[in-house]
């Protein structure tokens, strides 16, 4: 297995459970992977194709839901709001995989507008649920509460390799996220971070037979690495079992 972010690790686990001897080779390891920087939320963001991503997302949702029963996993189920843009339609394409889903009450939407910026981590306890807005024709904005911090974001600057947080962008994040969740005005900043999502037009998950053996590609998950992880991992294991005698 090449790579040890969430996609690589989940694939390695499923391969090992299938019966393969599994070895991970990676340039970067925790805490230097993109998955360490990620807010780590189930939300299909910049990943496709929609038909296959829906299946992978649905499976991963089920795995995370089961893991949330064990507090030692660190996984929690939290309510959230996805703010739709005009012309987006009433429901997102990933609706069938999302479990409980309802229209937001008007009282829950007071004061929300979108932002773009890099990730800022602030102290936990000031946001009761996650909020997702924009990302299409308007800038991306999200507030994601976690046990150890609340993540404010985000950016989707295609083609940029700059890993240095920008102070002016960080200030803008706080101001705009505070407009979404006013309580964040009192939250202490813990850290700043930038990560590089593995973007491509759609996820590549396919089997390639070469003169040296069988290669199973599983990359290009964009902002949906956590969301697609277990679904893609189980397809990797099925492909390996079908192509390689154990």
Image (cartoon, helix red, strand yellow):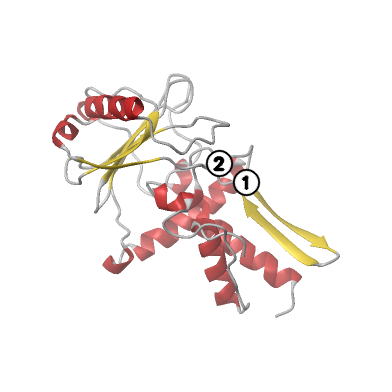
Instruction: Report, in whole angstroms, how far the alpha carbon at label 2 lies from the one at label 1.
Output: 7 Å
Q: How crowded is mark 1: few (under 14 residues within 10 Å), some or many (20 or more)?
A: many
State the image coordinates of residue 64 (x, y, percent, origin top left): 40, 59
Residue 59 percent across, percent down from the top left: 50, 57
Quadrant of image for the N terminus: bottom right
Residue 49 occupies quadrant: top right
Residue 226 vertical placement versus 184 (above, below): below
Could you tell whether 52 is left or right of 119 in the image? right
Q: What is the count of numbered marks?
A: 2
- Given residues 186 and 161, the one toward you in this image is 161
Task: Give the quarter of the figure containing the C terminus.
Answer: bottom right
Nearer to me, 80 or 194: 194
Note whether residue 157 is visible: yes
Secondary structure of the residue carrying tag 2 is: loop
Can residue 109 be seen in the rendering of this structure? no
Residue 237 lies, with reference to residue 127, above or below; the image says: below
Left or right of 214: which side holds 154?
Answer: left
Mark carried by residue 203: 1
Q: Earlier in the sequence, mark 2 or mark 1?
A: 2
Label 1 element class:
loop
Is 156 left or right of 129, judged from the image as shown? Answer: right
Residue 47, disc: 2
Residue at 41% of width from left, 53% of height from top?
36
Q: Which residue lies furthest to the left in this view?
A: 186
x then y, percent, for residue 126 = 17, 40
The location of residue 188, given as percent across then percent down, is: 17, 40
Does the residue at mark 2 contact the one at mark 1 (Cβ under 8 Å)? yes
């Amino acid at each position: 297995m090449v790579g040890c972010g969430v996609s690589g690790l989940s694939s390695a686990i499923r391969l090992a459970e299938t019966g393969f001897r599994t070895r991970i080779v990676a340039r970067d390891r925790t805490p230097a992977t993109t998955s360490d920087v990620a807010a780590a939320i189930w939300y299909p963001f910049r990943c496709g194709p929609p038909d296959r991503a829906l299946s992978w997302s649905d499976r991963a949702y089920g795995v995370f839901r089961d893991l949330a029963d064990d507090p030692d996993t660190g996984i929690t189920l939290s309510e959230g709001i996805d703010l739709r843009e005009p012309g987006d339609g009433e429901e997102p394409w990933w609706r069938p995989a999302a479990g409980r889903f309802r229209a937001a009450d008007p009282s829950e939407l007071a004061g929300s507008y979108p932002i773009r910026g890099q990730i800022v981590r602030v102290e936990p306890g000031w946001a009761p649920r996650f909020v997702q807005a924009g990302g299409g024709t308007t800038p991306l904005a999200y507030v994601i509460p976690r046990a150890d911090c609340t993540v404010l974001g985000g950016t989707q600057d295609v083609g940029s390799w700059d890993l240095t947080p920008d102070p002016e962008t960080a200030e803008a994040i706080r101001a705009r996220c505070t407009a979404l969740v006013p309580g964040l005005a009192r939250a202490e900043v813990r850290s700043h971070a930038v990560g590089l999502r593995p973007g491509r037009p759609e996820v590549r998950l396919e089997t390639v037979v070469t003169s040296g053996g069988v290669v199973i590609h599983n990359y290009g998950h964009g902002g949906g690495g956590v969301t697609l992880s277990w679904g893609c991992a189980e397809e990797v294991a099925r492909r390996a079992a079908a192509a390689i005698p154990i």
